[in-house]
Image: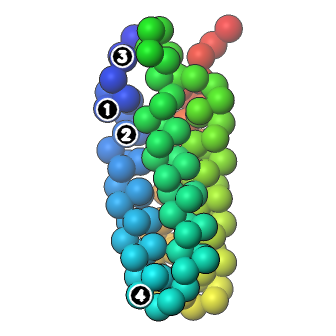
Amino acid sequence: MNETMIQDMEIWDRIVEMAMYGFSLTSRLREKYRYRIAESLQQAVLGFYLNIADGPGADSGDPGPDALTVARRSLLDTAYILTLLRERKLVSARMAGFMVPRLEALSLEIERYRPTA
């Protein structure tokens, strides 16, 4: 990958969109006094958002494999937490149904940005 700016990655806008939804849900959970699960969701969202941002190497412009691995796992963690929240009726089935497939797709798509040997 030749781009040095993370915003040039094709998935950046979708990552930001999912992060904003995640942060919004975190705020709603805190309003319902669900602090621990809100904190877990926030950590997972920050995990994919910040690690995608850390992905490109400073000099080479290539995503760092460790940051991408953490970002991918954090996307899946976010999806798993949303599934749990849906089951507990703390998040609507509609919201979970909107976010979970997108998070899973983004997790798979990150593999495209892994440097090739």
Q: Are marks 4 and 1 in contact (CB under 8 Å)?
A: no
Q: Earlier in the sequence, mark 3 or mark 2?
A: 3
How far is the residue under mark 2 from the one under mark 4?
A: 29 Å
Residue on which disc 3 sits: 3
Say if 78 sits above or below 84 in the image.
above
Instruction: Determine which quarter of the picture holds residue 7.
Output: top left
> As rendered, which of 73 and 36 lies closer to the eye?
36
Q: Assess disc 4: are there few (<14), some (14-19) or many (≥20) residues with their C-alpha within 10 Å of its C-alpha.
A: few
Per the rendering, the mark at residue 7 is 1
Q: Are marks 3 and 2 in contact (CB under 8 Å)?
A: no
Residue on which disc 2 sits: 12
42 sits to left or right of 114: left
> As rendered, which of 67 and 86 lies closer to the eye?
67
Q: Earlier in the sequence, mark 4 or mark 3?
A: 3
Residue drawn at 51 percent across, 29 percent down: 55
Residue on which disc 4 sits: 31
Residue 70 in picture, x, y percent from top left:
64, 41
Question: Which corner quadrant holds the N terminus?
Answer: top left
3 sits to left or right of 103: left
Q: Are marks 1 and 2 in contact (CB under 8 Å)?
A: yes
In this view, the mark in front (4 or 3) = 4
Q: Earlier in the sequence, mark 1 or mark 2?
A: 1
Q: Earlier in the sequence, mark 4 or mark 1?
A: 1
Three-letter residue code for mark 4: Glu
Residue drawn at 65 percent across, 86 percent down: 87
